[in-house]
Amino acid sequence: MTSTSALPAATILGYPRIGPDRELKKAEESYWAGRSELSALEETGRALRAATADRLAELGLAGEGAIPESFSWYDQVLDAAVAVGALPSRFADLVEADGSISLASSFVLARGDEHRPPLEMTKWFDSNYHYLVPEIGPDTAFHLAGDQLIRWTQEAADAGRSVRPVVVGPITLLLLAKAADDAPEGFDPITRLAELVPVYAQLLSGLRAAGAAWVQIDEPALSADQRLTAAQLAELIPGSLGLLAAQGDRPQILVTTGYGEPEGLVPALLASGVEALHLDLVKGRIPAVSELVGAGATQLVAGVVNGRNIWRADLGTAAARVAELSSRLEQAGGTGGVVVGTSTSLQHVPHDVTRETALDPALRDALAFADQKVQEVVELAAGGVEPGSVDGPRSTPRTFAGVRVEAVRERAAQVTAADADREDYALRAAAQQEALGLPELPTTTIGSFPQVAEVRRARAAHRKGVIDDAAYVQAMKDEIARIIALQEELGLDVLVHGEPERNDMVQYFAENLEGFATTEHGWVQSYGSRCTRPSILFGDVHRPAPITVDWATYAQSLTERPVKGMLTGPVTILAWSFVRDDQPLGETADQVGLALRDEVTDLEAAGIGIVQVDEPALRELLPLRVRDHADYLDWSVRSFRLSTAGVQAATQIHTHLCYSEFNVVVDAIDALNADVTSIESARSRGEILEAIDPDAFPRGIGPGVWDIHSPRVPSTEEIAEQLTRARRVVGGERLWVNPDCGLKTRGYAETEASLRNLVAATLQVRAAA
Ligand code: GLN
Ligand code: ZN
C-alpha cells in the first residue's frame, strides 16, 4: 500500500446509474434490439461515469477517495460474479480463451438466450431493487475474469478524476449466491470463501495499479444474514477481509455494511485491519464504546443520510449521531475520526428533485433525491449544523396542505378491533356458497388480461389529452366486453374485467387517492434497464370518489357469472411507493386500509359479490431481522383486514400473493383471514403444497397451475396432474384453479390456449372425483 491519505470528511456509498433521463436504459435497450452497436452503448456508459463524477464534485464531494465509482451496466452483484469468474456450467462457453468474460456475455448471464435461462433474480435486501443470483458450486473456477472496474478506475485517472471503485465483497457475494444446480445436496457457496479471496486480492492490486487510493468493499450481508449466527459470521472476517487487508499491494479499504446493523461484528470488522468501516446509522444503532475499543486508527463512516427514502434529513438529529459516534470513538481510544456518509448507496432514489417543477413547491422543499442527499452529507461534514438530540424526530414536521386531514385522523382514531373482524369462516363459507353457487374447483384468473398495444395507446392518448374522457371510457369498455366474452367462451367460473385501465397496480391507486403525488423524472432502477417511478405518499390518505366501481359493474352487467372486483392492498401500495416518515408506518397503512375499505364496500353495494385485494408485497416488506417480524405483521395484517372486513358474510374476499414462500409468511397469510388466497406454485413446481397444512390453513386456496412468467402453454395433462396432487393435499372443498399471477405481460395466443387447457383439466379432475 503506497497512498495513505485519509478518507475525506464527506462521501456517499453510490449514486444512481441509470442517468437523469434514463440514458443507460435507452442505450441498452437499443443495443439489445440490434438498433445500435456495442460501441455506442460503451460510449453512453463512459459519458455517464464522467458526468456522475463531475456532478458529485460540483455538489461538493472533494478529496481523494470521496467519489465512488458505482456504475454498473446491469447489476452490481452480476458485476462481482463476472469479475471473479463465478459462472454456472451452462454458461461455461462465455469464458474466452484468456479467461475473460465480455460485456456482451455478461448480458447473456442477465438475460439468457435461446439455449439457456438467465440467472435468477431476487430482491436486494429489503429494497425494491433486484439482483441476479450467482450460482456457485464446488467446482466453480474462480479467476479474475472481468476487469471493467479496473478499466473504469484507469479511465477516471486518465481524465484527472480520482474515484473510489466499489465492489460487492466476497462474503456478501457468497451469502447471496445459491448452490449451482449440479452441486451436491446441501452444498453451501460460503464454503468457497478461502478460494475466492485470492481473486479479490488480485482485483485489488489491479485497482491499485490503475491509481485507486481507496476501494469500497460492500458487505451488507453482514447486516442482514439470517442463516449464520453472529459468531459464525465473525469467523469469516479474518480469512477474507482480514487477508485482503494484510496484503501489501492494494488501495486503502472501506468496508460498508448498509441495510441494517452488523450486529456483534463491529469488533471483528475493526480487527480486520481495513482502513475505514461504514455503519448504517439510519437502520442500525451507534456502537457502544466497548465495541469500538479496537478501532485504533480506523476511520468510521457514519451513514446518517438515508439512502432509501426521498425525504430531507433532519440535519440536527443526523449531526447529533455523528457527534455521538465521534465521542464514543474517542472514548474508546480510536484516532481515525468520523466521516459523514449515506446509510446505503443512493441507487434507490431518483437523481434530482429540482427538476420536479410540477410538484407543489412546499412538498418539493421537503424532498431530497440523490443530489440533495449529497448536499446534505456535504453540509453535515462542513460542521455547520447544530446537533439536536440523537433520537430526534426522523424528519422535520411537514405542514403543507394535505399532510393532515382531520377527518381522516378522526376516522382512524375511532377504529376498533371489531372493524378488522368478520364472522367465522364456516358461516361465511356457507353464505358464500349459497350466494355464488360455484362448482367444486372453481376456475378464475388473477385479474389482468394481456395489455394489447391498442389499450396502451388509448391510455396514453387520454393522458396527453388527445382523446376525451368519453372516447377513453368507450375504448376501455370495448376491451372489457371483449375480455368478458372471451372468459365466457373459455368457460371460466369467476370472471374479471381484465384491468385494461391500469398502467401499474400501485400507481393507478396512487393517482386516484388523495395523499399521493407523482413525479415526472423520479425514476429508480428496479433491475437491469427496468425502472419504476414510485409515487410519493406524503399526506393523509383518503378516497375522494369510487375508483373501480364503474369498471367492475360494467363488466358484471355483461354476464350472469360472478365478476371479481380487483384492488391493490395497503401493504403493497406502501411497499411500492415512497412513504412519509413523519408518522409510524402502521398509521399510514391504516389510512390506506380505510380508503380501500370504502372501495370494497362500494363494490359490494354495487352488486359485486367477490372482491380480490392483492398483496404481493406482504412477503417483501418482511423485516430482515426476525425480532422485527411481529411488529410488522401486526400492522400489515391489520391494514389488510381493515380494508376487507367491512363486507357481509356472503361477500367473498380473495387475496393474491406473487410468491411461493408460503411457509415464510404462513401465519400472516392465515391472519389476513381472506376467504380465498391465490399464490404462485407452478413456477416452483408445486413446492408450496408441502407447506400447506390443511389444519393450519383452513380456507380457500388457489396454488397457481400455469407459470405465466414464460409464454409456454401448459398441457391439459400436466395441469390435471397438478390439480390431482393439490386436491390430495388440501382437499376438493377448498381448492381453486388459477394461473400463478396476472396475465398483463402475456400475449393472447398463449393466454387463450393455456386457459382452455386449465378449464379442460379442471373438468377432467372434477369428473374423476
Ligand atoms: N391483479 C394483478 C394482476 O393480475 C395482480 C398483479 C400481481 O400480483 N403483481 O395483474
Ligand atoms: Zn402475482
Image (spheres, rainbow, N blue to C red):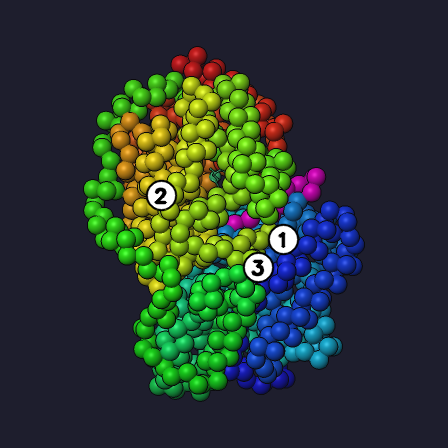
- Horizontal and vertical percent for residue 59? 57, 77
**Looking at the picture, does residue 363 appear above or below residue 419?**
below
**Looking at the picture, does residue 331 appear above or below residue 165?**
below
SS assignment for the magenta stretch, majority: loop
Inter-mark Cα distance, 3 to 1: 15 Å
Residue drawn at x 61%, y 53% is 528
Is residue 609 a member of the stretch shown in magenta?
A: no
Q: Which residue is more in the foreground, 565 or 183?
A: 565
Which element is circle 3 on? Answer: loop
Q: Quadrant of the N terminus?
A: bottom right
Q: Badge 3: few (under 14), some or many (20 or more) residues near its Cα, within 10 Å? A: some
Which element is circle 1 on? Answer: loop
Residue drawn at x 62%, y 40% is 457
- Horizontal and vertical percent for residue 335? 44, 87
Residue designated by label 1 = 529
Marker count (numbered): 3
Residue designated by label 2 = 596
The kind of residue tagged 3 is His
Q: Which residue is more in the foreground, 202 or 195?
A: 202
- Residue segment shown in magenta: 113-122
The image's mark for residue 129 is none
Q: Is residue 97 left or right of residue 239?
A: right
- Horizontal and vertical percent for residue 452? 61, 35
Q: Does residue 723 show up?
A: no
Q: Badge 2: few (under 14), some or many (20 or more) residues near its Cα, within 10 Å? A: many
- In primary-sequence order, the first of circles 2 and 3 is 3
Residue designated by label 3 = 521
Which element is circle 2 on? Answer: helix
The kind of residue tagged 2 is Leu
- Residue 725, quarter of picture: top left
